[in-house]
Image (cartoon, grey):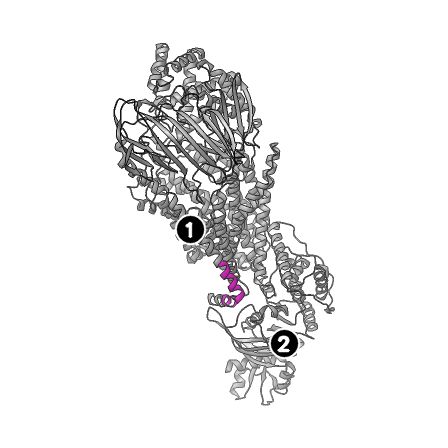
C-alpha cells in the first residue's frame, strides 16, 4: 500500500548525513570491538586451554545484547526524531490539516524509522563479520562462519528487541512532543533490566520473562551449556525465550494501540506532564500607558556578577528538578541502586553487613554511569533551553557575560550531581538502618562521593557543556559524548594502556578498613588532577565557543573567538594550559617509571615463554631440599616496605650427587643470594628471578649447604604497590623467600617423592625475628619466644616447635585480640578494632573442629591464631598457615542475623581450615592430579560432619545443597573435559569441594558414617608424615576396607564422571 | 543620545547579502525602519542588538563602538525580536525576575519593585502569575516590552512588534512605545506604514538590504503634496497616453472599479487629486529603487 509519509520519511533519512554517520559509526565500532577482542592489536590469545569463539552463535548473541544497549541511542534518533521533527519545525500545523489518516501517519513514521534501525543493527553484524574475516581462521578465537547464527542473532534477538523498545520511544516522543522523552525511555529500559536482575535474581524464570532485552531468557536457556556447547551449539529457541518475546511484543502492541487512541491531528499536545496553568480572565486593559518612571539600581561589579551567576544556576537547577524526565530518571536510578546494594550485601551463599566500603564499590560505579548519563542529557537541556524555547535572542542581548552563563550551567549540573550523590548516600544509610547496622562512616562516604567521585563527574560536566556548545545538533552531541565515554572504557582493547589518553577514566580504588585507600590515592589524584586540569583548559574554550546571538557560519564563530580572546582570557588560558602541561608531564613521568619498574602482561607472557624454553631442561635435575630457614624480617608500615635477611639450610636427601643449584627468588622482590665461594653463577633470568649456580664442591647424599640471602620489596610506584606491607594489616606470604628448583612444572606431574604443596621441602624449621612499628603487633608462625621494644619499633621472635610445611605468612597490624580456650588450646582472634562481628561463630568453628578431629589425633600446637587481613590482599576467605589462620575481612563482616537460613560461613570456614591440620598438614597428598581430593574433599566432608554434629542435620543438608550447586555451577564453566574426582586438578575446586563432599557423603551413607570415619582414621594414621598418598592409593585403601558390593559405587563417584540430581544424594 | 550606523554590510554564510552599506543617524525619539518582508530589517535589528557581527562597517552609540564595548552597550539596550518564545510553565513574574537578574538588577527588593512597575506599564498585573507560554499574542508582545523595560534602556530596538496583533492591542502597544521615546531612542521596524505614520518622528526605508531613504514622515508627505492622483485608467492606458507617472497602488472602489493611485507631475482631466499619504512615499521609494 502506498504511504506518502513513509516514502517522504525514507527519502529524508536517505538524504540525511546523520544516517550515514550512524551507519558508519556502528560498522566501525563493532568491527574494532571484534578486532580488539580477537587480539588484532596486541596479539592473539595464547593458551593451551580451549577458548571461547568470538563468532560462535552464542558469542554473536552476546554481542547482540551488548550492541542492543548502544543501538538504543539510534532508536531515539530514528523513532524519536522522525516524530519530533514535525513539531520542532511547526510543520505539524500544516501537515495535520491534510486529509491523511492517523494510521497512515503513524505507520509511515514508525516503519520508515524501523527500517533505518534495522539497517544500523545490520551494520553492527556487518562490522563483526568484517572483524571475523580480518582475524582469520588461524586466530584461536575464530571458528567457521555460520550464516544462520548471524541471522538468528540479528532477527530474533537484536532487531526484535529494538523494534519493541522503539515502539515505546516512538509513543513517548509522539505523545509528549518532546525528544528528551525518548532518551528517558531508553534510560529507564536499561535501568529496568538492572533492577529486575538485582531484584529477581532468586526467581530466574520470572526474570527471564520480564527482561525487555531477553538477555536473561537467553541465559536461562543456556545455563547448562558448557564451553564446548557454547562454541558449537545453535542458538536456543526455548519456551521461555518465546514467551519473553511474545510478552514484550504484546506490551508493544498495547502501547501502539494506546498511541493510536491518544494521538490526534491536534495543535494541542496529547499528553502534558505537570500542572497546567489555566488562562485567566483578564480585566479590560487600559489603552493608556501608565507611568514608566522608576529607578533601577543596576550593579555590574564582580561580586554582583558572581551573585547573578548563582541566581541563574538556581533557575537552571530548578528547570532540571522540575523536569519530569529528571524525576523519572532519578527515581529509576535510585530504585536501581537500591536493588544493587541489596544484592551486594545479600549474595546467594552468604549475607554481608551493609558496609560502607561495599556500597562505595560496584554500586557507586554503576550509579556514576547513571549520573554521567543525566549529566549528558540535562546539560544539553539547560544549554539548549533558551534556544528550544526560542528565548535566546531576548537573553543574548542582555549584558550578562558569557562566563556568567557558563558558570551558571556548570554550577547547576554540578549541583544536580551533588544531589544525586546525596540520594545515593541516603539510600545507603536507609539500607544500613534497615539492617540495624549503625556504624555510619560519614567521613568515608564524604571522601568517596565528594572528594574522589565528584571531580571526575565535574570533568564530564565541562566536557558535556563543551560538546553541546560546539555542536548545535544535540543528537550528534549526545552520540559523540557517549562514544567518548565508551571509548575511554575500551581503549585497552586497542592495546592502549595509558591514563593520558583514556578520557577521564580513573584508576580503580579499593578500600579496606585496615588500610583505607592506602597508596592508591596518590595515583588516583594524579590522574584526577590531570583530567581536572584538562577540564580547566576546556573552560576558557567553552567561553570562546559559547553560542550567543545568531552567528551562522564557522568563519563568524572564528571571528567571535578572536574577539573573545582578550588579554585576560588569553592569560587565563595560558595558565590553565601550563597547569595541564605540568600534570601531563607528571603523569607521563610516572607512567614511564611504572613501565620501567613493572612489566606489562604482554612482556611477562613473553618472558615466561622464553624462560620455559631455556630453563625447562633443568626441570628434573636433582636438587637439595630446604630444611631450615632463619629469618630476620623488618616491616615498615608507614612506607609500605620491608627488608629481610636470613639463612636457608639445604640437605641433599637424594641418592645422587648434586653439582648445580637452581634458586628462584620472589618475583616482586629484589633478592640477593650469597653462596660465598661455594658456587658460581652460570645462568640468570632477571625477569623470572631464577639463578643457576655450579657448586664448586658437589653435594653428596646427606650433605648440607647453607646460603644467606637478603630481600627487599620492589619499589612501590604511584600506580603499583610492590609489597603487601600496608600501613595496617600487612600480610606477607612465604613466596618472598628463595625457593629451590624449577618452579614452572606442569600440574600433571605425578610424583610421590614430594607432597602436593611443594617439591623443594618436606617440612622445615622456621625461626623468625620480626620487627614492626611501635603501634603494631607482628606475627609469624610458631610460638612467640620473645618480644621487646627498642626505640620506636616493636620486635618479636617466633620459633616453630616442630617442622612445618612451607605455607606460612607474616602479619603486622594494629590488632585487638579476643581470646578463648578449648581445653588447653588457646584460641586468639586478632582483629581490626571496628570488626567485632561473628566472633562466637568463629570460636565455635575452631572448637568444634578441635573436638571433632581429635579422632585423628591431638592438635599439635599450643594455640590457634585467627588473624584478620585486609580483603584487598587476597580473594580467598582463609587459609591454614601452621598454627595461624589468616582470615579475610569478609568473615568479620558477615551478617549472621540475615543468614539464619543459609550455612554459617564464619563457622564453616574456621572448622574447614583447622581440619586441614589433619588433612593437609599432617597428612599431605602426593604431588599430582587428585591431590586435592585428599586435602580438600576429605576436609570438606569432615566439615560437613562437623556441621551435622554441632549445627544439626538441617544446616548440614543446606551445606550439602550448596556443594551440589557449586559443583553444577563449576561444570558449566569447565573449559575442557571434566575429569573424575580422583584426577581433579588444582584449579578445579568445583570438583574437589563440591563433588568431593557429595562423593564422600554417598560412601559414608552406604557403609555408615562411623565405619567410614574409622577408615579415614586408619588412612590418616598410615599416611601422616612423609608418606605422601595419591588419590589412587586412597581409592584402593577405601576399597580394601569395604565390601566388594560397594566397589561399583566407589568407582562411580571417584573414578567416573556421571550426572546426578540433588534428590539422589540427599 | 546618538546612534550612528556607518556603512554596515552583512553577508551570511549562504552568500546572501542581507545588508548593503547602510549608514544611518538616529537621535532620541521614535525611529521607524520601514521595508517589505525580507528587506533586511531584522538583520539590521539583530546587528544593532549585537547578536550578529556586521561583515563590514561600524556602529557607534554615543561615540562608542558597540561591538568593542558590547557589555556596557547592552546595559543600555532593550531589545524585542520579531519572534520570541519563553520557558514553558514559567509565570510572567518569575520570567521577569530571571530577566532582571540577566540585566544586572542586584537586590531582590529592586527587582520586585521594577517587575511590579513594568507589569503595570504593560498592563499585565492581573496575568502576572499566569504562565507566559499560555498568553495570547498581544499579551506576549506586551510581556516582551515588559522585559525590555526592566533595565530602563536608553536604546530600545523592537522588531516588527505589531505583526499579528489585533487593532486594540496594536494601539495599546504603540502607546507604550511612544511613552518610552521621550528621552530614549526607540528603533522600530515594521512593514506597516501606518505604524510609522502614527508614531515616528524619523524613518528610513530599506529594501534588499539597501537604504533607500531616511526622512521625517511629515517631510515625506509634504514632498508629495499635489502630486498624488487617483484614476480609473489602467496602467496600460496611462502608458499608451504617454503620461509620465509612477504607479503606487491600486484598489477597487465601491462600484468595483479598479482605481490606480499614481504619482505624477502632470495634471489630467481623468485624474483626481488626492491627499498624499506616507504609504505613497513608501511605494514611490520602493518603485524607484526597482527602476534603478
Graded by Cα atoms within 10 Å as few (under 14), some (14 to 19) or many (20 or more), the crowding at tag 1 reads few
Give the extent of the magenta segment: A560-577
Graded by Cα atoms within 10 Å as few (under 14), some (14 to 19) or many (20 or more), the crowding at tag 2 reads many
In this picture, is A504 found above or below A903?
below
Position in image of residue B136 (x %, y %): 65, 61
- By secondary structure, the bulk of the magenta-drawn segment is best described as helix
Q: Is residue A40 visible?
A: yes
Q: Secondary structure at mark 2?
A: strand
Position in image of residue A550 (x %, y %): 53, 66
Mark in front: 2 vs 1: 1
In this picture, is A422 found above or below B279?
above
- Label of residue A324 in the image: none
Residue at the spot of label 2:
B31
- The chain letter under disc 2 is B
Q: Is residue A550 visible?
A: no
The stretch drawn in magenta includes residue A571: yes
Residue at the spot of label 1:
A589
Amino acid at each position: 500500500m502506498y504511504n506518502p509519509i513513509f516514502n517522504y520519511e525514507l527519502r529524508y533519512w536517505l538524504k540525511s548525513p546523520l544516517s550515514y554517520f550512524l551507519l558508519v559509526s556502528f560498522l566501525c565500532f563493532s568491527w574494532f570491538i571484534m578486532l580488539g577482542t580477537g587480539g588484532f592489536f596486541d596479539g592473539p590469545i595464547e593458551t593451551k586451554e580451549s577458548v571461547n569463539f568470538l563468532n560462535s552463535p552464542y558469542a554473536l548473541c552476546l554481542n547482540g545484547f551488548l550492541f542492543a544497549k548502544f543501538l538504543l541511542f539510534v532508536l531515539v534518533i530514528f523513532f524519536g526524531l522522525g516524530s519530533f521533527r514535525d513539531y520542532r519545525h511547526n510543520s505539524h500545523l500544516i501537515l495535520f490539516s491534510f486529509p491523511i489518516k492517523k494510521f497512515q501517519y503513524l505507520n509511515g513514521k514508525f516503519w520508515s524509522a524501523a527500517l533505518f534501525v534495522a539497517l544500523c543493527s545490520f551494520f553492527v553484524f556487518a562490522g563483526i563479520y568484517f572483524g571475523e574475516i580480518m582475524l582469520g581462521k588461524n586466530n584461536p578465537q575464530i571458528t567457521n562462519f555460520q550464516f544462520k547464527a548471524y541471522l538468528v542473532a540479528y532477527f530474533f534477538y537484536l532487531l526484535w528487541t529494538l523494534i519493541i523498545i522503539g515502539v515505546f520511544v516512538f509513543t513517548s516522543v509522539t505523545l509528549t512532543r518532546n525528544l528528551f522523552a525518548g532518551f528517558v525511555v531508553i534510560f529507564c529500559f536499561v535501568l529496568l533490566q538492572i533492577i529486575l536482575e538485582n531484584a529477581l535474581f532468586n526467581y530466574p524464570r520470572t526474570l527471564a520473562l520480564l527482561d525487555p532485552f531477553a538477555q536473561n531468557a537467553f541465559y536461562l536457556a543456556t545455563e547448562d551449556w558448557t564451553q564446548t556447547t557454547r562454541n558449537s551449539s545453535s542458538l536456543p529457541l526455548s519456551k521461555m525465550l518465546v514467551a519473553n518475546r511474545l510478552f514484550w511484543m504484546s506490551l508493544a502492541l498495547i502501547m501502539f494501540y494506546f498511541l493510536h487512541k491518544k494521538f490526534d491531528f491536534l495543535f494541542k499536545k496529547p499528553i502534558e506532564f505537570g500542572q497546567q496553568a489555566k488562562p485567566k480572565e483578564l480585566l479590560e486593559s487600559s489603552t493608556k500607558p501608565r507611568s514608566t518612571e522608576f529607578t533601577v539600581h543596576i550593579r555590574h561589579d564582580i561580586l554582583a556578577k558572581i551573585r547573578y551567576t548563582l541566581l541563574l544556576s538556581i533557575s537552571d537547577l530548578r528547570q532540571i528538578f522540575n523536569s519530569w524526565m529528571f524525576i523519572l530518571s532519578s527515581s529509576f536510578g535510585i530504585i536501581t541502586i537500591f536493588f544493587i546494594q541489596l544484592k551486594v550485601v545479600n549474595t546467594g551463599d552468604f549475607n554481608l553487613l551493609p558496609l560502607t566500603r561495599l556500597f562505595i564499590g560496584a554500586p557507586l560505579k554503576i550509579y556514576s554511569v547513571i549520573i554521567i548519563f543525566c549529566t549528558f542529557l540535562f546539560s544539553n537541556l539547560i544549554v539548549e533551553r533558551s534556544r528550544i524555547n526560542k528565548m535566546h535572542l531576548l537573553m543574548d542581548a542582555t549584558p550578562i557575560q558569557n562566563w556568567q552563563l557558563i558558570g551558571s550551567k556548570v554550577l547547576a549540573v554540578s549541583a544536580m550531581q551533588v544531589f544525586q550523590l546525596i540520594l545515593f548516600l541516603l539510600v545507603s544509610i536507609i539500607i544500613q538502618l534497615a539492617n540495624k547496622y549503625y556504624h555510619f562512616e560519614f567521613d568515608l562516604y564524604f571522601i568517596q562521593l565528594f572528594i574522589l567521585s565528584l571531580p571526575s563527574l565535574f570533568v564530564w560536566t565541562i566536557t558535556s557543556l563543551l560538546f553541546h556548545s560546539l555542536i548545535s545538533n544535540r543528537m550528534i552531541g549526545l552520540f559523540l559524548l557517549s562514544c567518548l565515554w565508551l571509548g575511554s572504557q575500551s581503549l585497552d582493547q586497542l592495546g592502549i594502556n595509558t591514563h593520558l589518553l583514556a578520557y577521564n577514566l580513573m584508576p580503580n580504588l579499593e578500600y579496606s578498613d585496615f588500610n583505607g585507600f592506602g597508596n592508591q590515592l596518590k595515583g588516583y589524584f594524579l590522574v584526577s588532577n590531570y583530567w581536572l586540569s584538562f577540564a580547566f583548559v576546556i573552560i576558557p574554550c567553552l567561553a570562546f565557543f559559547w553560542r550567543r546571538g545568531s552567528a551562522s557560519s564557522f568563519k563568524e564563530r572564528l571571528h567571535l573567538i578572536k574577539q573573545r580572546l582578550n588579554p585576560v582570557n588569553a592569560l587565563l588560558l595560558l595558565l590553565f594550559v601550563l597547569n595541564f602541561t605540568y600534570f601531563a608531564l607528571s603523569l607521563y613521568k610516572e607512567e614511564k617509571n611504572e613501565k620501567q619498574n613493572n612489566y606489562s602482561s604482554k612482556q611477562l607472557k613473553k618472558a615466561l615463554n622464553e624462560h620455559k624454553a631455556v630453563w625447562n631442561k633443568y626441570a628434573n635435575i636433582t636438587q637439595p631440599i630446604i630444611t631450615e630457614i632463619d629469618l630476620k624480617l623488618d616491616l615498615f608500615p608507614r612506607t609500605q616496605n620491608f627488608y629481610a635477611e636470613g639463612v636457608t639450610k639445604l640437605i641433599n636427601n637424594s641418592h645422587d650427587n648434586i653439582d648445580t643449584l637452581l634458586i628462584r627468588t620472589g618475583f616482586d622482590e629484589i633478592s640477593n643470594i650469597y653462596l660465598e665461594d661455594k658456587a658460581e653463577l652460570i645462568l640468570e633470568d632477571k625477569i623470572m628471578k631464577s639463578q643457576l649456580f655450579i657448586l664448586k664442591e658437589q653435594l653428596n647424599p646427606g650433605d648440607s649447604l647453607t646460603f644467606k640471602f637478603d630481600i627487599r620489596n620492589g619499589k612501590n610506584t604511584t600506580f603499583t604497590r610492590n609489597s603487601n606491607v600496608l600501613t595496617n594489616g600487612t600480610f606477607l606470604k612465604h613466596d618472598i623467600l628463595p625457593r629451590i628448583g624449577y618452579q614452572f612444572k606442569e600440574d600433571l606431574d605425578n610424583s610421590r617423592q614430594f607432597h602436593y604443596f611443594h617439591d623443594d621441602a618436606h617440612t622445615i624449621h622456621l625461626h623468625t625475628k620480626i620487627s614492626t612499628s611501635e603501634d603494631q603487633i607482628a606475627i609469624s608462625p610458631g610460638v612467640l619466644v620473645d618480644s621487646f621494644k627498642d626505640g620506636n619499633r616493636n620486635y618479636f621472635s617466633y620459633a616453630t616447635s616442630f617442622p612445618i610445611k612451607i605455607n606460612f605468612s607474616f602479619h603486622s597490624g594494629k590488632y585487638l585480640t579476643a581470646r578463648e580456650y578449648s581445653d588447653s588450646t588457646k584460641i586468639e582472634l586478632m582483629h581490626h578494632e571496628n570488626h567485632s562481628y561473628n566472633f562466637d561463630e568463629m570460636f565455635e568453628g575452631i572448637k568444634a573442629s578441635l573436638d571433632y578431629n581429635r579422632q585423628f589425633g591431638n592438635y599439635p600446637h599450643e594455640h590457634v591464631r585467627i588473624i584478620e587481613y585486609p580483603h584487598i590482599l587476597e580473594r580467598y576467605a582463609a587459609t591454614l598457615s601452621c598454627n595461624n589462620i589468616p582470615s579475610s575481612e569478609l568473615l568479620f563482616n558477615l551478617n549472621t542475623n540475615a543468614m539464619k537460613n543459609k550455612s554459617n560461613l564464619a563457622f564453616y570456614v574456621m572448622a574447614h581450615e583447622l581440619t586441614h591440620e589433619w588433612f593437609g598438614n599432617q597428612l599431605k597428598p602426593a604431588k599430582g592430579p587428585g591431590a586435592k581430593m585428599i586435602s580438600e574433599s576429605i576436609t570438606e566432608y569432615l566439615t560437613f560432619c562437623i556441621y551435622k554434629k554441632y549445627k544439626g542435620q538441617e544446616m548440614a543438608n543446606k551445606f550439602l545443597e550448596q556443594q551440589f550447586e557449586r559443583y553444577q555451577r563449576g561444570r558449566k564453566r569447565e573449559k575442557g573435559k571434566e575429569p573424575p574426582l580422583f584426577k581433579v586438578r588444582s584449579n578445579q575446586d568445583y570438583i574437589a569441594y563440591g563433588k568431593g563432599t557429595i562423593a564422600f557423603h554417598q560412601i559414608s551413607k552406604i557403609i555408615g558414617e562411623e565405619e567410614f570415619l574409622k577408615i579415614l582414621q586408619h588412612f590418616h594414621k598410615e599416611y601422616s608424615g612423609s608418606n605422601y598418598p595419591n588419590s589412587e592409593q586412597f581409592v584402593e585403601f577405601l576399597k580394601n576396607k569395604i565390601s566388594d558390593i560397594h566397589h561399583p559405587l566407589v568407582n562411580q563417584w571417584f573414578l567416573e564422571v556421571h550426572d546426578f540430581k540433588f534428590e539422589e544424594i540427599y | 543620545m546618538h546612534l550612528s550606523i556607518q556603512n554596515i554590510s552583512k553577508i551570511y554564510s549562504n552568500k546572501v547579502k542581507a545588508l548593503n552599506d547602510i549608514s544611518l543617524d538616529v537621535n532620541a525619539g521614535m525611529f521607524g525602519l520601514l521595508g517589505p518582508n525580507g528587506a533586511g530589517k531584522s538583520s539590521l535589528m539583530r546587528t544593532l542588538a549585537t547578536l550578529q557581527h556586521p561583515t563590514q562597517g561600524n556602529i557607534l552609540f554615543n561615540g562608542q563602538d558597540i561591538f568593542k564595548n558590547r557589555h556596557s552597550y547592552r546595559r543600555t539596550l532593550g531589545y524585542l525580536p520579531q519572534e520570541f518564545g519563553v520557558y514553558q510553565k514559567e509565570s510572567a513574574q518569575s520570567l521577569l525576575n530571571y530577566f532582571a537578574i540577566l540585566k544586572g538588577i542586584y537586590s531582590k527588593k529592586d527587582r520586585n519593585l521594577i517587575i511590579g512597575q513594568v507589569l503595570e506599564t504593560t498592563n499585565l498585573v492581573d496575568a502576572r502569575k499566569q504562565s507566559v507560554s499560555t498568553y495570547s499574542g498581544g499579551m506576549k508582545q506586551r510581556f516582551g516590552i515588559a522585559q525590555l523595560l526592566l533595565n530602563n534602556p536608553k536604546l530600545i530596538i523592537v522588531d516588527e512588534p505589531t505583526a499579528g496583533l489585533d487593532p486594540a492591542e496594536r494601539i495599546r502597544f504603540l502607546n507604550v512605545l511612544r511613552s518610552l521615546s521621550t528621552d530614549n531612542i526607540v528603533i522600530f521596524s515594521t512593514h506597516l506604514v501606518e505604524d510609522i505614520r502614527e508614531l515616528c518622528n524619523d524613518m528610513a526605508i530599506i529594501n534588499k538590504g539597501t537604504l533607500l531613504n531616511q526622512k521625517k514622515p511629515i517631510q515625506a508627505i509634504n514632498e508629495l503634496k499635489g502630486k498624488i492622483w487617483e484614476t480609473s485608467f489602467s496602467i496600460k492606458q496611462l502608458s499608451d497616453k504617454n503620461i509620465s507617472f509612477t504607479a503606487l497602488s491600486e484598489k477597487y472602489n465601491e462600484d468595483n472599479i479598479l482605481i490606480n493611485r499614481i504619482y505624477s507631475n502632470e495634471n489630467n482631466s481623468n485624474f483626481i487629486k488626492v491627499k498624499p499619504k506616507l504609504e505613497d512615499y513608501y511605494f514611490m521609494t520602493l518603485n524607484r529603487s526597482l527602476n534603478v
